[in-house]
Image (spheres, coloured by chain):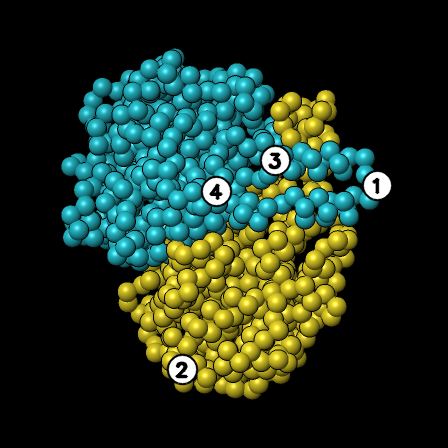
Amino acid sequence: MARDAGKPIAVTGIGMITSLGVGVAENWRRLTAGDSGIHRITRFPIDGLRTTIAGSVDFMRDEPITIPSHSYVMADRAAAEALAMAGMAGQDFPGELVLAAPPIEHDWGTRRALSARLDCGENSPYSPGRRVHPPTPDLAPYYEDFLNGTLAERLAEKYRVCGSPITLTTACASGATTIQLGVEAIRRGDAPAALAVATDGSISEETLIRFSLLSALSAKNEEPTKASRPFSKNRDGFVMAEGAAALVLEDPEHAKARGAAILGYVRGVGEAADTFHRTRSHPNGQAIIRSMQGAIEDAGLQAADVGYINAHGTGTPENDKMEHFGIVNVFGAEGAKKVAVSSNKSMVGHCLTAAGTVEAAFTILTLRDGILPPTINYEVPDPAIQLDVVPNQARRQEVAFALSNSFGFGGQNVSLVFAAA
Amino acid sequence: MAREVWITGYGLLSPLGETPEAWFAALADPARWRAGVDAAACAPFPIHPVGAYALEKQVPKPGDQRAMGPLMQYGAYAAGLALEMAGIKGNAALLQETHLVAASGGGERDWDLDRQILAKLEGANDGGALLNQQLADGLRPTLFLAQLPNLFAGNISIIHGVSGSSRTFMGEEAAGVDALRVAFRRCAAGQGDIFLVGAAYNAARPDLHQQYHAGGILLTGGWQPLWHRPEPGVCLGSSGAFVVLESKERAMARGARPRARLLAVESERTARKPGAAAQIAEGSFARILPQTKPGALAVLSGASGRGGITHEEREFLAAVAGDTGLPVRGTAAAFGHAMECAPLQNVVLAAAALERRALFAPLEPDEPIEAEFEGALRQVLVTSWGHAKGEGMVLLEAIDG
């Protein structure tokens, strides 16, 4: 947590892809219309699965999808859009790249193909009883494409960023962490800009089943668009989704000097780690509360100054309960009833690694246009959660300051405060 | 960038033990460090495993132990050692202002399950339904959490109570250097006072062996001297390494004893065309050079052993040594190459060597860059040229000079 109110950092470019579509304009149009991007999974067989719906991004390409290739294509598209919007396309980027990416490992298609071709020794589970080949150059993609650093390396080369690109994960807070790292680097004068990108194309049989086994996913499969129900009494889990977003962060003086249009500002960042449990917050909510308070303090504001909260709002029973608890603690019982709180995840699903950046981008658009996106599927209010969730329909409302929350498995919590330009 | 940054604690769980006495005793005797190589366990790939250690000393709760695979266990153990040395362990107030920056890949998979599934899929017609069923029946929720890289830091927060913040970097060697760089720069700039920075690596991972072997980078057969290995020259080593970074002001205010001073962390990248990494390293070294003390400086190299790039680093270091006579130690010869953890491991070794003012003997006496050094060690330059990408350089100094 920064001890002084930090310098505001300008946002001069945004790029985005979610299950709602490609590009900022299409996403914002559909989000404010209350559309859902959740649908039946067609990427792989769904036989026997408890959850058969997702917000997968299936319209980017026709080739077979691997997690790194899909994540790269979306990150690349988002970065290109953000840089073009910032007026920085095709030039050396004056700062570093901070990328949030899903952890990369071989998926089952890759694992099967490679296991059939490469001899890894008698003891290896991955060359079961085969006498096949030593490594040959055609197998190199099975190595290079699946290194955790490769996505950032390729983006750094393509977009000509400075220095060593960072790849990070703080689970579902990852996107927000990229913005935080970029803001910190600009504030301490390392560079006048930073490119914060987050991407997640990790929907596969195994990832879906893993989250299912943690009882984290909604199983309301009948009507996919109705499954994600943040803050509702009948919420039963989150819906996995894919997407990417990119933000060009810039020192305001640098942006003004080159005549760039400023879309909004990052005013404050806060974070806190929970030490209680691997998938649950401490019942005292301290880490969530410290995270929100830290961001508001860093912005030099009071809670009452914040007019809108872009909630983490996953739709799991646990998250929404704890987030409400945290909001009541930070804003007070009365303040919590006044501040508008909505969840983009009701429409795009939970983009996991990319969620924090996708939602940061939506928050900037919210401030820019004075339109609060709704929480859809809000039909059965949870009496224990007394919040103005902007139910079901977007609302015209000018807001000066907005808070965006991202809380991850493993206790990593990040909150960001944004201001209108 | 005004504040001085100290290392006030370090911890290293390694193939050569977990105490400075053990590391330096083993490094002084080639027969002892060579005995750390296990050629059989993951044949045809030799590895440097960590020896027996008492996990419960740093991770007392069985529930916490079960929630982690070896990778995270090594990290949690080394983090505990570093916090203990820094006098932070168990101090709730200090832990709440401690920021954690870790470098880690994903945790271990269930290899027996993978083996079974691959065997069953082999003859199956309807692979998809079978795969779903096998995964749903076989995967265990606890293991999934042990696979998430961010749980590496998450577990350290839970076990040791580190609650300032938690960030996990991914991406092989460069992730380790960048974790150190970001913590160093935040600390120097006043964006936090106390940082716990580290990484871990488990060399006995058949899933990673399969991936790396597809790229033709792993050494097969027997151990070989580091600097002259073929392209498939990486011999992996298990490790957990953490340091506590602290602003001088904060450390003095609480009476913490400094172990070494961190002077510079350089982290760059380039498309790896021949000579490109050396060119980047020349730039980094030129920036660091004004802070160096010729005659009292040694290099701990993170060279991975992968042929081409290791030979390029050897030539770069030979050129630098030709001007200044500085002695080099390629530590992967004795510890194995620990990927994300390699740069952190060398930073810990550097801090411990600086406390003793002494460098250990050459690991490859026939290689000219591994010169003898009998003088009083005042500074150590750690290099980290990733096996695939990333060129890092770190300068540390003894506290009194």
N-term-proximal mark, 3 vs 4: 4
Residue tagged 3: B111
Q: CA distance from mark 3 to mark 2?
A: 51 Å
Pinpoint residue A280: horizontal percent, then vertical percent.
47, 59
Q: CA distance from mark 3 to mark 4?
A: 17 Å
Kindly indicate whether the residues beneath marks 4 and 1 are on one polypeptide chain: yes
Given the image, what chain letter belongs to the residue carrying mark 4?
Answer: B
Which amino acid type corresponds to the residue marked 3 in the rendered image? Answer: Trp
Q: Which mark is residue A90?
A: none
Q: Secondary structure at mark 3?
A: helix
On-image quarter of the C terminus of chain A = bottom left
N-term-proximal mark, 1 vs 3: 3
Question: Residue most toward the right?
Answer: B125
Given the image, what chain letter belongs to the residue carrying mark 2?
Answer: A
Which amino acid type corresponds to the residue marked 4 in the rendered image? Answer: Arg
Which amino acid type corresponds to the residue marked 1 in the rendered image? Answer: Asn
Identify the residue at image location x=62%, y=73%. Answer: A234
Q: Which mark is residue A333?
A: 2
* Letter of the chain in cyan: B
Q: Which mark is residue B66?
A: 4
